[in-house]
Amino acid sequence: MTPFPARRLRRNRSSDATRSLLRETRLHPHDFIYPLFVQDSSPSPSPVLSMPGVFRHTPDSLLEEVAKASAAGICAFAIFPCIRPDLKSPTGAHALSEKNLLFSSLRSLRSSFPNLIFIADVALDPYTDHGHDGILTPSGNDVDNDQTVAALCELAVAEASAGASWVAPSDMMDGRVAAIRHALDAAGFASVSILSYAAKFASAYYGPFRDAVGSKIGKKSISKASYQLDPANAREALLETRMDIAEGADLVMVKPAGPYLDILGKIAENSPVPVCAYQVSGEYAQICAAAKMGWLDYEQTRFESLLAIKRAGADLILSYFALEACSALQ
């Protein structure tokens, strides 16, 4: 008589060694892109209060943080500038200034770390006084798609000239990937990749990031629903991604990551290019806050959240946990 049950699945979970050998999904330092903020308004790094452990770096401390992360095995970094309020304007004109902090930071990073990947965001929200990702129409009620795309093309070329390995349009304007690809190629930057924020949702999880870069105007909530994706729409996210790939995107992004694992999984199953996922500031902040209250185990929750993103199909993960996670992996 065959004992019941004939197949005992717990045999494959019986010890640490067995579980380690049979683990289907693993995290590696090369899975991570480390987002970093830089400012020039303070002589020392300043903490982002809504993101414990995250700082707006000075140009010097930015170099130190990249060196530390590189030693932990991270080879890709997304750099976000925090621009002084007096340099912001309705059109975000400072984005194209030779004195843009982002450009000087990229030049310094490229000189110090020639073999690392530095990713520059292509959007105007750090530079506009209204906090939107582009130039507003005369009525002020909408973002002018085509005028914004023209400015983004200039910004992408300037970022490439300053040393960006990849440019990352995060604005969600129509047609911007094809336009940026043409502009880069025409300027002699055919080797610079485009990481498109292809499925970027109008999410409530971005609040701490907007604190970090100063794109939140006072306590006012800025609606970007006319250009970012509706959180209810999956098919539209797939269509946006297919269109960006057709326009020449070298990599595509899903943002946020954790609340949109279903979208991430569908895109990863069908994408011919690498798929990235951004574990955004709100995801990071809620884990930190719950752990501080003693409601969650910080390290276990951190790794589980990252593992879930990798398991869903992400080739690369942008996460503020990147350095901690890679140090623990070592």
Image (cartoon, rainbow, N blue to C red):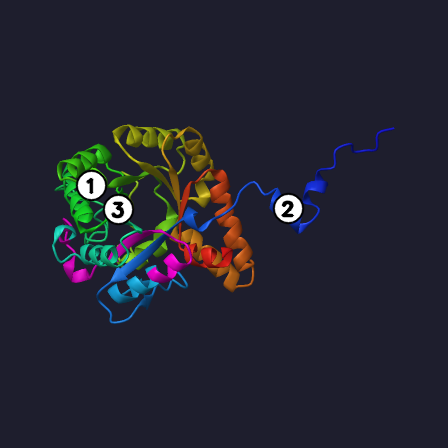
Q: So how many labels did they put on this image?
A: 3
Say few, some or many: other residues with alpha carbon within 10 Å of mark 1 (under 14 / 14 to 19 / 20 or more).
many
| Membership of 68 in magenta stretch | yes
Q: Quadrant of residue 9?
A: top right
Q: Residue at x 61, y 42 (%)?
A: 22
For the residues labelled 1 and 2, the Cα–Cα distance comes to 51 Å
Q: Which residue is mark 3?
A: 165
Q: Is residue 173 above or below residue 58?
A: above
* Residue 148 in picture, x, y percent from top left: 17, 41
Per the image, the residue denoted by label 2 is: 19
The circle drawn on residue 123 is none
Q: Position of residue 283 (x, y in %)?
A: 44, 51
| In this picture, residue 91 sits left or right of residue 226 | left
In reply to whether residue 27 is colored magenta, the answer given is no
- Quickly name the residue at label 1: 143
Foreground mark, 1 or 3, reads 3
Q: Position of residue 310 (x, y in %)?
A: 47, 43
The magenta span reads 67-94
Kindly tell me whether residue 114 is visible in this rendering.
yes
Between 218 and 182, the one lying in front of the other is 182
Query: Label 3's element?
Result: loop
| Earlier sequence position, callout 3 versus callout 2 | 2
Instruction: Please tell me which residue is depicted at 24% across the width and 41% down the height of the picture.
Output: 192
